[in-house]
Amino acid sequence: MHPEIQNMREVALVYLDRSGGLQKFVHDCKRYNDSKQSYAVYRFIISINPSDIAELDATLGNYILHNPLQAAQIFQSVCFIAIKTLSLIEQLETEAQISILLKPTHLPPLPSYVLSLSAYPFNYTSQRFYMSEGIVIAMGTVTKYTQGARFLCAEETCPFSEGFRYIRVHCPGATESATVRTDFVCSLCSSPLQEDMKFRVLGDKQIVEMIDAKILNALKGYSNDKSHFRIQAFTVFLRGLPPPPFLFYLFLDELANKMTIGNHYRIIGIPACVQNGLQATACIEVNSIQLCKPNGPSFLSDNFKYLLSLTSSSCWRFTAVLANIFASQVVPPGTYNTLKLAILLSLVQTCEKENADYLDLLIVTSDTLVIDRLLNYSLCLLPRGIRHPPSSEIFPSVSKDKHGTGSASIQACSAVLAKGGVCYIGDLSSYKKDKLELLQSVLESRTTTVFIPGKKYGEEADQQVTISVQTNFWSFVDVDSSSKKHIQKENFLIGQMDMSLIPANLVDVFGLLIYNEFPSYRLSSPLVHHILKKAINPEAMLYKVSQQFRTQDYEEFILFAKNLHVELSSEAENLIQGYYLASRRVRRDSVHGSTLSASALKILISLSKAHTKLSLRHTVLQEDALIAILLLESSLTLKHGTSALCVAPNSVFPFDLSDENSLQQRDIYLMQCHHELLKFIAAYGPGIHINANEE
């Protein structure tokens, strides 16, 4: 034996002893031994810390990182000697029966250990450990593969016609034929080898498609990033044993079904090339999976901090100025303020938590070009802002796996890729009835179900997979398109809009319905000047505020605000409940009952929390609840007409904000609205007592 190999075996034993791996190995062996059953392959997973091993012995550390398959053989020998010396597994006969999977805890933080398919070249022939990050865009169903098999010599007089001399186990990148074939021959007598089917070990295999996170930049409608790069999906193999009724298998750390579609993961594995007929596919055999969580709160720019200090005298001024100057690269400051405020509220209400406070926007407009630009710009402020291409599916779909397994593969599509962000689906009137019904179902339940017919994809039974949809949706309706396709009704209530193009139930499940402030036939003068100047010089900074509050500053601001934890105060909760109950009594008819949907209360709470986050506070005040109520009441007026509360169409921004005096006038106006709201609750919400400030 080579002295270097012997030395690495000794170091491996020392490492297992010091790291606690030897104790775990003995415990795993006991479970195998207690089963009293003979196996062709005994599989062990050994966790490896490359840094600790490199400190013990640099040679072994280098061997593990750059020759993991050969390094596994070193640990295989150590484990076999330990089993025989300590009599851990009585049924074990040969060293070939031991299968070792090395699972590194991490890799050195160096560029040579990072594998990215957006970089060239892609070295998939080295068969060493690499770290890669990506988003799961497709997942196949779990299928079977041969993890290990026992072969015997067909010649009965040959010594190898019995025992466990010929054991074959799966290697990274190997196909089924590499493990099980009919043309293997005995190395002693050259007779054919026959598989002993009683000892075949089947495992679970799942094929996953991942994409570099940079692909999200290409799926946005607008971006300041002018760089060009190549994006390519890569195939990931997750393998493991199925959960049989034997207790001793349960300690194995298996990887099948450990990923969720749409999530961002960091993986460690060995790249390989899988041959499927004439087609070769680059893939990664995964050894370790780690979920990548979104970045924590960043820091605010000095300009935002200064603005917050200037507007600290009022709970309404900071968000008013934010909305007023927002997206000055796309529309002039002071235009579309209500819409821009709603966009900011929706942006800060994005997260990847279950049962989150979602805030969906539906905009009624005839300025589709300007609205489209504004929404596209806003998407880019989030890491997960996805503009849905009309030619593809919004929600997950099923197709046949392209790797030759014949199984089903679930494709992520736009809504799942926008997880924790916003999915912008464009003009709602362009979608057919079945798509709109599916959208309504998802908005109500925040889940979608994928049906997989068993016969079509080689399964015994049909399957239904439920996928969580954790994203906000933005869309708009073209008023001009609506008037062309439908004959407008004449019996509209005051303030009500013609929404006959879209099903009423679908309109109700959107959090906010917003009407565009500037119809196309009477564009404001600042907007006309802005469009003309941008057409002449697209890169020009037309306003000083665009330099003070850059797009990057807004990205950092939203990242900071969305991670704030806010709680409802008792005063705000009473105001919200009082308005909700009073509105249910007012908005009622004898046929259909209350026209206020059950989701309205949830929308009110979401809006109130969003305004609190946007104000950079932790407690929802009555002032936040008032803005939420005014926005929702304006939305309800567009859907069902005015109520006894009777708010103006532009109730949140009744006039232009040009100076300190106009902000003061707005504060006075909102305090009057608060007073009118209290009177409304007192009149139509009997039994509800709300303490109002005499001021």
Image: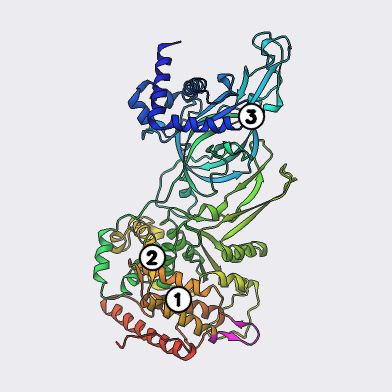
Q: Is 132 or 459 nearer to us in this picture?
A: 459
Judged from this view, the residue extending furthest toward the right is 455
The residue that appears at 73% across and 11% down in the rendered structure is 155
The residue that appears at 33% across and 26% down in the rendered structure is 55
Q: Secondary structure at mark 1?
A: helix
Write the start and end of the magenta stretch as one range.
585-594
- In this view, the mark in front (2 or 3): 3
User: What is the CA distance from the residue labelled 2 to the residue labelled 1?
Assistant: 27 Å
Based on the picture, tell me whether residue 287 belongs to the magenta stretch: no
The residue singled out by tag 1 in the image is 631
Q: Amino acid at mark 2?
A: His
Quadrant of the image occupied by residue 350: bottom left
Q: Is 306 or 661 nearer to us in this picture?
A: 306
Q: Position of residue 57 (x, y in %)?
A: 35, 22
User: What is the CA distance from the residue labelled 2 to the residue labelled 3?
Assistant: 79 Å
Q: Position of residue 443 (x, y in %)?
A: 57, 64
Is residue 520 something one can see in this rendering?
no
Quadrant of the image occupied by residue 148: top right
Quadrant of the image occupied by residue 427: bottom right
Q: Amino acid at mark 1?
A: Leu
The residue that appears at 39% across and 22% down in the rendered structure is 11
Q: Are marks 2 and 1 in contact (CB under 8 Å)?
A: no
Q: Position of residue 211 (x, y in %)?
A: 51, 43
The answer to whether 18 appears left or right of 468 in the picture is left
The residue singled out by tag 2 in the image is 530
Q: Is 551 or 155 nearer to us in this picture?
A: 155
Q: Earlier in the sequence, mark 2 or mark 1?
A: 2
Q: Earlier in the sequence, mark 3 or mark 1?
A: 3
Q: Quadrant of the C terminus?
A: bottom left
- In this view, the mark in front (3 or 1): 3
